[in-house]
Image (cartoon, rainbow, N blue to C red):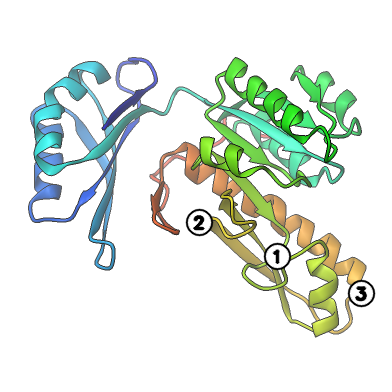
């Protein structure tokens, strides 16, 4: 299966991702093809999962020809290895829809990172079941959609959400502390395209108030988890996690404040990995490769 994303821009960093059943000669075949096509390979990562029998590879390269020509020439080799692969022009910013409820720390962080270029995304819309951040989002010249959700209107609300996603051409939906459970149907339709930030270091302390649970247990580490959304609540493939140390001297409110900083950082890192095609779904888990040189560079500071 082939996907091509992005235009044809001369001599800019592109990435190629490959996944297929493991066998000998894959690295030589892929890198050899790119080399023969005049591409300058800048960076390469690969991994074989012995348990699933799958091979994963990501290459960053500078092309001398367009993506369509590269893809056409690669097709016979890909068929031989039964590859799923994608060519991506990283100069094309990923289109993203953000969903938020009443906690705005992750939304604020993403708006800032997007503005300075630290997170190269194009925020197409913000959807919320509350109006708390409407003015802030509109002032940033981003469309704001207030979609109320009740048990009685949930199907209609999700239909409206999906219409926004389709109309904007968004390739990724980010749940930036959106406090509504998505339906099984939406999770299946958007499989691998919704990232959630969970305010807990999963699988511990699930539920509505994990920081209070952590405080009552006297833990010394609290954290956050970014994962793909599946029909199994908070059980989706994990992309990124992090922790911060706390002591007996901190209050439950301190846990919440410290945890929010971790949440914002973990969510941003997960989105960064996804849009740079560094994340591969591997059953109930993920393979996440390190960033290529220069991928964290910002357009400007402040």
What separation in Å lies between label 3 and label 1 (alpha carbons)?
A: 17 Å
Point out the residue furthest to the front here.
Answer: 152
Question: Which residue bears the numbered disc 2?
Answer: 237
Circle 1 crowding by C-alpha within 10 Å: few under 14, some 14–19, many from 20: many
Residue 203 position, x and y percent, is 62, 70
Total of numbered circles in the picture?
Answer: 3
Going by the image, does 255 lie left or right of 25?
A: right
Going by the image, does 123 lie left or right of 220?
A: left
Q: Is residue 66 visible?
A: no
Residue 72 position, x and y percent, is 16, 20
Question: Which residue bears the numbered disc 1?
Answer: 200
Residue 184 position, x and y percent, is 60, 44
Q: Identify the residue at horizontal 31%, vertical 32% (top origin).
A: 86
**Could you tell which of marks 3 and 1 lies nearer the N-terminus?**
1
Label 2 residue SS:
loop
**Could you tell which of marks 3 and 2 lies nearer the N-terminus?**
2
Q: Are marks 3 and 1 in contact (CB under 8 Å)?
A: no
Foreground disc of the pair 1, 2? 2
Question: Which residue bears the numbered disc 3?
Answer: 251
Foreground disc of the pair 3, 2? 2
């Amino acid at each position: 299966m082939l996907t091509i994303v992005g235009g044809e821009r001369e001599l800019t960093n592109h990435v190629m991702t490959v996944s297929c059943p493991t066998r000998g000669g894959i690295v030589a075949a892929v890198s050899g093809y790119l080399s023969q096509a005049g591409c300058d390979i800048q960076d390469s990562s690969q991994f074989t999962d012995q348990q699933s029998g799958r091979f994963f590879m990501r290459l960053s390269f500078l092309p001398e020809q367009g993506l369509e020509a590269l893809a056409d020439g690669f097709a016979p080799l890909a068929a031989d290895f039964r590859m799923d692969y994608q060519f991506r022009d990283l100069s094309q910013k990923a289109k993203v829809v953000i969903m938020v409820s009443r906690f705005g720390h992750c939304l604020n962080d993403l708006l800032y990172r997007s503005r300075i270029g630290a997170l190269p995304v194009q925020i197409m819309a913000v959807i919320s079941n509350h109006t708390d951040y409407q003015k802030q989002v509109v002032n940033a010249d981003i469309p704001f959609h207030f979609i109320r959700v009740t048990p009685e209107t949930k199907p209609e609300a999700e239909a409206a959400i999906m219409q926004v996603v389709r109309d904007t051409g968004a390739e990724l939906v980010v749940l930036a502390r959106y406090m509504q459970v998505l339906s099984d149907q939406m999770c299946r339709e958007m499989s691998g395209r919704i990232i959630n930030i969970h305010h807990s270091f999963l699988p511990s302390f699930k539920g509505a108030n994990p920081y209070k649970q952590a405080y009552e247990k006297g833990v010394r580490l609290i954290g956050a988890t970014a994962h793909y959304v599946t029909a199994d609540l908070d059980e989706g493939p994990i992309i990124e996690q992090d922790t911060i140390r706390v002591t007996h001297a901190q209050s439950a409110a301190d846990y919440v404040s410290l945890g929010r900083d971790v949440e914002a950082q973990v969510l941003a890192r997960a989105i960064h990995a996804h849009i740079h095609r560094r994340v591969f779904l591997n059953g109930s888990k993920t393979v996440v490769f390190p960033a290529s040189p220069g991928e964290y560079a910002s357009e400007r500071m402040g």
